[in-house]
Amino acid sequence: MSNYSKLGQFDPEYAAIVTALPPPPPPEKQRDHSRLREQFNVRVVGMTKDTLRPHLPPEDAYTVADHHVQVDDGEILVRCLTPRGSEDISFPMLLWIHGGGWIVGNVELDDYYLRIICVEFQIAIINVEYRLAPEHPSPIGLNDCYAALKWVPYSRGQLTFSQTVNNQALFGGDISRGFLVGGQSSGGNYAAVLAHRARDDPFFENRRLSGTILQIPIVLHPKAYPDKYKGELLSMEEYRGTSPSLNGERVEAFWADLGAEPLNPECSPFLYPSHAGLPPTYVQACGRDPLRDEALVYERLLKEDNVPTRLDVYPGVGHGFHVYYPTLTAAVKLNADFKAGLRWLLGRDSQ
């Protein structure tokens, strides 16, 4: 049994900023989700784009194409980013799922960062805009992402389901060179579940995922902690109302909006009876994050089931700190580690 509380000792740079901030207000009991999304788009999406805009690769180095994927009761948007190259070159593929507590966010959130990754790593990226809770409760958003994952290697018709085509050709992808799924925070939750679904689905028998990226993921409902691990899962209470970014109270509010079944492994992937057979998995976790302990124990469970893993932890910083304070030393390291983790999953460690 491990106690990870020592990882919460403040990072000095981070502490100098956040200790001067007022405590966060408690979550509103009746939340206006439309207003929350508008605020998020201005404060977080806008800020992120302003930060990354000077670092974007030249426009002629990649292409951007929005497509629509049919899902239950409608369709969703996926944004496909593809490096420019000669027509006979194909690329490994990454399906990316944005964060936002299942209630905010869209393809714009990580768009600029993914453009940078697309060109630097010569990888085709499919960025999913799944439907959000609470208007679309569990498992709608999850099923949307799974439909997008299945759309990547194969679909019935070029977006219209009229005939069989190979959608990899739409954006120069080749899953035999790498087929990854990843996400941040709540997007990491969906990515973890998709990895299990794909493992068990005959559809993927000859289209196996080759890697999973879980960046500061949420993998276990706080009402579903197994007795065996309760002594290790302390961070949710440790940062219940004190964190200036995400805290335990807000995590519980997100879960309530999602309408999830706590004990269902498709909501709490931590609870799958076996993780054996999953692809290699890269995990990032923050030391002052209420999600810290579930991420760390989950990574250990994967290793115990012989899943190759790579883990990076950032002591003394809160959930999503790199988004709000990208110049901090720890944030620069997180982004460098993300690239190293992606390189590992693509088998490019020696490059």
Image: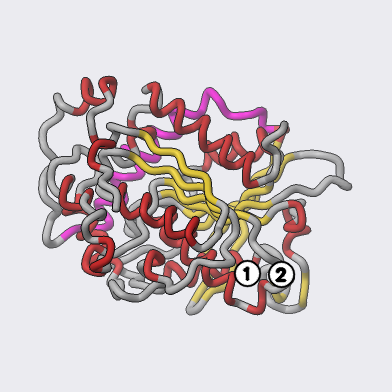
Tell me, yes or no, if residue 6 can be seen here: yes
Query: Does residue 320 lie above or below 267 as drawn?
Result: above
Could you say which disc has been placed on residue 206 in the image?
none
Q: Is residue 1 left or right of residue 182?
A: left
How many marks on residues? 2
| Kind of residue indicated by mark 1 | Lys
Query: Looking at the magenta stretch, what is its main secondary structure?
Result: helix
Q: Are marks 1 and 2 in contact (CB under 8 Å)?
A: yes
Residue at 58% across, 70% down: 198
x, y percent for residue 319: 31, 41
- Binning the other alpha carbons within 10 Å of mark 1 as few (below 14), some (14 to 19) or many (20 upward) gives some
**Quadrant housing residue 60:** top right
Callout 1 secondary element? helix
x, y percent for residue 273: 43, 74
State which region is magenta: 31-59
Q: Which residue is mark 1?
A: 150
Queried whether the magenta region covers residue 45, the answer comes back as yes
Tell me, yes or no, if residue 257 can be seen here: no
Queried whether the magenta region covers residue 94, the answer comes back as no
**Quadrant housing residue 82:** top right
Nearer the observer, 8 or 251: 8
Q: Which residue is mark 2?
A: 154
Report the residue that reaches farthest toward the right. Answer: 88
Disc 1 versus disc 2: distance between alpha carbons?
6 Å
Residue at 37% across, 50% down: 296
Nearer the observer, 114 or 286: 286
Callout 2 secondary element? loop
